[in-house]
Image (tube, rainbow, N blue to C red):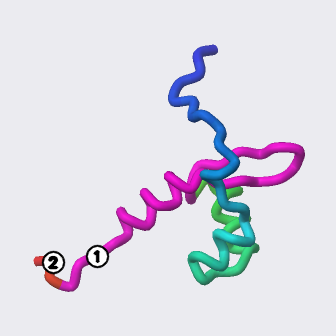
């Protein structure tokens, strides 16, 4: 089995589920449900703790931007 797209873990570039729920203004349960459905940002699970890749969080936020000047 070949593993592709491995990202280097950097604790300083992660956000936990509580932080992400506050950042996005949704409940932690919503974040957990999206993760279980394969939706949302990439994450690491280390000793039972879920840590989201902050670069991926920011990418999703940028892709969600809709300009009021869009035609």
Q: Position of residue 44 (x, y in %)?
A: 71, 45
Task: Report if residue 13 lies within the magenta region.
Answer: no
* Mark seen at residue 34: none
Rendered image quadrant of residue 66: bottom left
What is the spatial separation of the Cα atoms under label 1 and label 2, in whole angstroms?
7 Å
Tell me which segment is drawn in magenta.
40-68
- Is residue 47 or residue 26 the one in the foreground? 47
* Mark seen at residue 70: 2
Q: Is residue 11 left or right of residue 25?
A: right
Query: Considering only vertical position in the picture, is 45 above or below 19?
Result: above
Q: Position of residue 38 (x, y in %)?
A: 61, 52
* Mark seen at residue 66: 1
**Figure quadrant of the C terminus:** bottom left
Rendered image quadrant of residue 1: top right
- Is residue 70 or residue 6 the one in the foreground? 6
- Give the structural element (helix, strand or loop) at label 1: loop
Query: Considering only vertical position in the picture, is 27 above or below 62?
Result: below
Q: Position of residue 18 (x, y in %)?
A: 74, 71
Query: Considering only vertical position in the picture, is 50 above or below 5?
Result: below
């Amino acid at each position: 089995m070949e593993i592709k797209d491995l990202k280097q873990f950097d604790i300083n570039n992660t956000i936990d589920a509580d932080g992400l729920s506050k950042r996005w203004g949704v409940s932690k349960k919503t974040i957990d449900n999206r993760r279980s459905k394969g939706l949302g940002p990439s994450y690491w699970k280390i000793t039972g703790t879920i840590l989201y890749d902050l670069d991926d969080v920011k990418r999703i936020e940028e892709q969600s931007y809709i300009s009021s000047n869009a035609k």
